[in-house]
Image (cartoon, coloured by chain):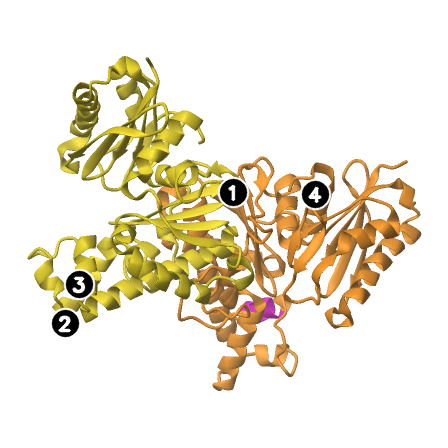
Chain colours: A yellow, B orange
Amino acid sequence: MRNKYICLDIGGTKVLGVIFDENKNIVYRIKKKTKAEEGSGKIEEKIIKVVDELITTSGIQINDIVAIGAGAPGVINENTGEIIYTPNLPWRNYNIRSVIESKFQVPFYVGNDVKVGVLGEWKFGAGVGRRNIIGIFVGTGVGGGIIVENRLFTGSYHAAGELGHIVLNTEGPYCNCGQRGCLEAYAGKIGMTKEIRAEVARGRKTILKDLMDPNMTLLKSKTMKKAVDENDELAIEIMDRAIYYLAAGAGSFVNIFDPDMVILGGGVIEAMGDYIMPRFKKQIRRFALPDVLQNTELVQSALGDDAVVYGALALVTNKSF
Amino acid sequence: MRNKYICLDIGGTKVLGVIFDENKNIVYRIKKKTKAEEGSGKIEEKIIKVVDELITTSGIQINDIVAIGAGAPGVINENTGEIIYTPNLPWRNYNIRSVIESKFQVPFYVGNDVKVGVLGEWKFGAGVGRRNIIGIFVGTGVGGGIIVENRLFTGSYHAAGELGHIVLNTEGPYCNCGQRGCLEAYAGKIGMTKEIRAEVARGRKTILKDLMDPNMTLLKSKTMKKAVDENDELAIEIMDRAIYYLAAGAGSFVNIFDPDMVILGGGVIEAMGDYIMPRFKKQIRRFALPDVLQNTELVQSALGDDAVVYGALALVTNKSF
């Protein structure tokens, strides 16, 4: 009976695949590691493999599947299923929908992963019933999603919501995008890692040096949490700086959008929400207009790592783009 | 015959009133100075006086008027006609609609003046046919209006669009709102005036000192233009700083909204558009993501001082809120 959904979170380093039943419960899940450098063909194969594996190991038939939904990184035309471009994966003007649909003969919908994650929080998580939501997802970088008047806002050319690239300090640290002082340069793990490396190079003592890999490649959220829990001075300084700029960015978004709700999510928030949220709520008062902020709820993501697959479910069942 | 519209731009220091005929042409106009310190009762009287004067001097009857529309400063509930609060005028929770409707027995619609101005640019000016527009109006302060998916976006509690209060430098100059480093603190005339005063106090030589009133109360746009035209070093420095931060703010808005168009308007832009626009277009490339910016047109307001009355016309004829 065709009443189930396959939903995917296609990340730079992993693919999460789940099957939802007709009651919107996750009845099966699988996680696969991917490698960006394997190229677009290989990644497409991985997606197909995950769908194949979901079907063969779960005992659920492809004929049971109503549709497949996915969130993927980059700027995506959600109408055509074309990945227009993506910063960390080798895709450009790549129509992933047609590939998946021709393989499985099932409708396939795809959107930007962070936007889809915010869609998930809106339809099934922290933001149910809200009309205007700002979602900020903090991980390797800082991504965003915007619900405006009960719709996911995608902008004129599918690129809206780059909340990590609000400029908070025109003379600030260099960001991966080429600008300076973006929110992402302060609060994303790449930005935090750069600052840790710079401080260590200056001779600063920190247990992060021992906790991270020898090349200090990329900070893990759990590593940061451990160092902060152990009162490491540098770790606290860098995390508090990230929170300060998260608050400055979110405060600006409150002033711009007058949202019902700001949702913080992503790996860093999942790992350290207890540390971040109270500090964030205090700091944002420095930046948001009080009359606007009083009507804005500030919350942590409710769906955690499942936000994107729930959003993919919303995508295929509501076609809310 | 009931086929004309009265439209008002209710400012802190002036009221502009016009009559539009059935072809949406301005057939009569009048301008009145107002004083904020005269209190809300007096301002309400001034509005009534302007409407009265429009009617008596134009020879057009109140029975010819379909509706009255207006833009006014502050946070306004455009559904109820209530001015929720306003920074520079002594109004709070003041229902101006009921006062005007009971006086003239004609429907009255009112919205925030900058939002209404952007509505005017969208329906009758630079932004005709665009789907997503960011309007930044630079005057005493910096206001904003946002068109999202063919609708004026007003936010959850009618406060959206405070584009002047995006934080561009967390340690920057103090803004009237109590924050630091807002766009308004750099690019609004109050912010520029403060910086001029500070530089003069430091002994900086500038012809602005002679051109402004002895107390250097508030810079006029024309004064700034004159000083820049005469190559005054301080004037150029402060104007270029304003443009730089306008570009940083607008660049962030491009990254956030992926708009079709950014419109700059307001008194400062009207007076100095030839100086500002080319520099603004150059600077914004530092801050906006290139892939997003390439799809965004950057233009100057087409309606100038009439943007708000045209927006008020759009308000009463389209009820576009």
Circle 1 chain: A
Give amino acid for label 2.
Arg
Q: Which mark is residue A131?
A: 1
* Residue at numbered disc 4: B315
Q: Which mark is residue A204?
A: 2
Residue span colored magenta? B223-230
**Earlier-in-chain disc, 1 versus 2:** 1
**How far is mark 3 from mark 2, CA to CA?**
14 Å
Q: Residues within 10 Å of mark 3 (few under 14, many from 20)?
A: some
Residue mark closest to the camera, 1 vs 2:
1
* Residue at numbered disc 3: A227
Q: Is there a contact, CB below 8 Å, between mark 1 and mark 4?
A: no
Residue B306 vs A282, above or below: the answer is above
**Earlier-in-chain disc, 3 versus 1:** 1
Image quarter where the N terminus of chain B lies is top right
Verify whether residue A72 appears in magenta. no
